[in-house]
Amino acid sequence: MRKENFPKLRMALAGITCLAGVNFAQAESAHGIAMYGAPALPPDFVSLPYANPDAPKGGKVVFGNTGGFDSLNPFTLKGTVPWQLRFWSYESLMGRSWDEPFSLYGLLAESIEVPEDRSWVEFTLREEARFSDGSPVTIDDVIWSYEVLGTQGHPRYRGFWGKVDRIEQTGPRSLRLTFNTEDRELALIAGLRPILKKAQWEGKEFGSGSISGAPTGTGAYVVTDFEPGRFVSLTRNPDYWGKDLPFRRGTQNFDELRIDFFGDQTVLFEAFKAGELSAVREFNADKWDSTYSFPAVTRGDVVKSEIPHQRPSGMTGLVMNTRRSPLDDWRVREALLLAFNFEYINGTVTGGVQPRITSYFSGSELGLKPGAADGKVLALLAPFHNSLLPGTLEGYTLPKGDGSKRNRGNLRKAMKLLSDAGWTVADGVLRNAEGAPLELRLLIRQGDGEMKTVSEIYARALERLGIVLIPETVDNAQFVERQNAYEFDLTRYRRELSLSPGNEQRYYWGSDGVTQPGSRNLMGMDSPAAEAMIDAMLTAKDPADFTAAVRALDRVLTAGRYVIPFWKFDAGRIAHVKEMRFPDSLPVYGDRTGFMPDVWWYQAD
């Protein structure tokens, strides 16, 4: 097992302290860009700090997914796609270092240029940039990619396109995007749009979600074989154009990446124990300690590695769909929070060793501070005081049970809130003024055994309040389809959050997602206060103002009672075959996108 003691995160937003020393007034070309200050790596950096530039190439690794897939296009809303494809086969103009809060370095682009106010951004393409079929990446491909993703692509790409005033070619290998909105992050977001091949889609519908083939990208891995619902195999392109770039040195080391699909997590784990899979991630600390003692582990053929991190907790739990009555009433949501006996459920599911998430940005300097809002946070929230839910300004903490199985004290509080909201018990059933019973449908992905256990315990607690919880277990395709259409009352929820939150926050919590299918705003929240805090984040030039805006947003989200929080993932836990190795130096984001398999390699003894 490896552990790394990180130095204290550079004041949570490392690099911000350099803000005053950077001057973009002359809009000089640069090798990289940071949200605040200067990027940490110099123009002549050798490799990313968490990559091994001498890592050997070779080997095949097999990962497991639950469910299935019916599309290989990860850029549209239609179909279910192996989530890894978006990260393994495609590239953008800039690439992200996961050892900094938010810094980008040239990938397809050799340089980036922005003015002081970041009202536009200009990129210059590398002359050697190629698609996986060997054809050159052109400015025409880049402009088309922005346009098609912004108009026909997945909703996660469309918000950015609405902030682009114009996009134009400025030279043989350069283009400029001019923005119509004051937003300092837009230049960085522009650098992260995937670039696809225009010619592949002539005469074809981009958003068809076809299983016939994957979009042509520039990444090192190409889909070479697949069987719908069973497996996808990707092979490293020996002619990959970027293999000698410093940004890529020591990364993308495996010859083949394969994803096998299983009906549920139990079957997947048994396949790993039998040697059919190369690695699995474990999110349950109790299972990590109790079920990973099978023969391959005791022989040393399988290694247990823990990967620490310094990112915010994010939010994991049961999200409540406020588009549906009575979940649009905060008193009902608070009652459901009170009825969720976290202490007992956590003890049952994780052995009680994983602490509870207390807010969306908890565990970082960006998280809300206990007690009443003050200073800059109060100043930001004060204009919205009439619309803020109780606890936003005064301070809100999650209900805490007494640890007993029945949780009587919290259930009494829950019943009082339900009564205030107009619900009464008749013949053991909670009913509203019209006599309709309170029934909640919990959407569960097939194979999610942990969620099944949680729902069984929670259903018994809700039954004591006269509420009926109806678990609905569906296959992977139906799960995605129903989430995209918001056809649920409650469902499992996970939002990863970064040390540099930005425009994605509007996609997570913005009012457009209330009615737009497929948004990440699963709770359906419509909060002018939250949107104003996001605006403050995006226009902040001072680190203290940025932090205050995030803390204020954290208050609005937490006191909104949109999610019943579960337990923190305090470290990444990966069990893997001994031949899989990773560097001793770990990124501040830990085991996240860009870590496994990106910087791992295969080394047989």
Image (cartoon, rainbow, N blue to C red):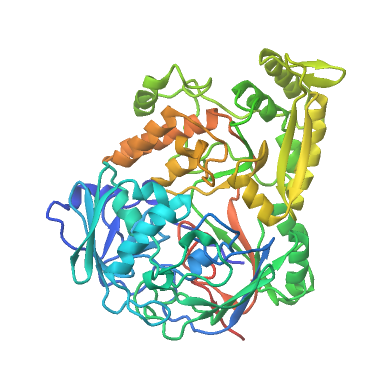
Q: Residue at x 72, y 23 (%)?
A: 410
Q: Position of residue 526 (x, y in %)?
A: 49, 31
Q: Residue at x 52, y 73 (%)?
A: 600
**What is the quadrant of residue 49 in the picture?**
bottom left
Residue toward you, 504 or 313 = 504
Residue toward you, 563 or 23 = 563
Q: Position of residue 41 (x, y in %)?
A: 30, 64
Q: Position of residue 538 (x, y in %)?
A: 33, 41
**What is the quadrant of residue 228 in the picture?**
bottom right
Q: Residue at x 37, y 34 (%)?
A: 548
Position of residue 335 in the picture relative to residue 588 (left or right): right
Q: Residue furthest front?
A: 203
Q: Quadrant of the N terminus?
A: bottom right
Q: Residue at x 19, y 72 (%)?
A: 172
Q: Quadrant of the C terminus?
A: bottom right
- Compared with residue 289, is residue 553 higher up or lower down, i.e. above or below? above
- Compared with residue 17, is residue 59 higher up or lower down, i.e. above or below? below
Q: Say whether residue 105 is visible.
A: no
Q: Say whether residue 17 is visible.
A: yes
Residue toward you, 577 or 474 = 474
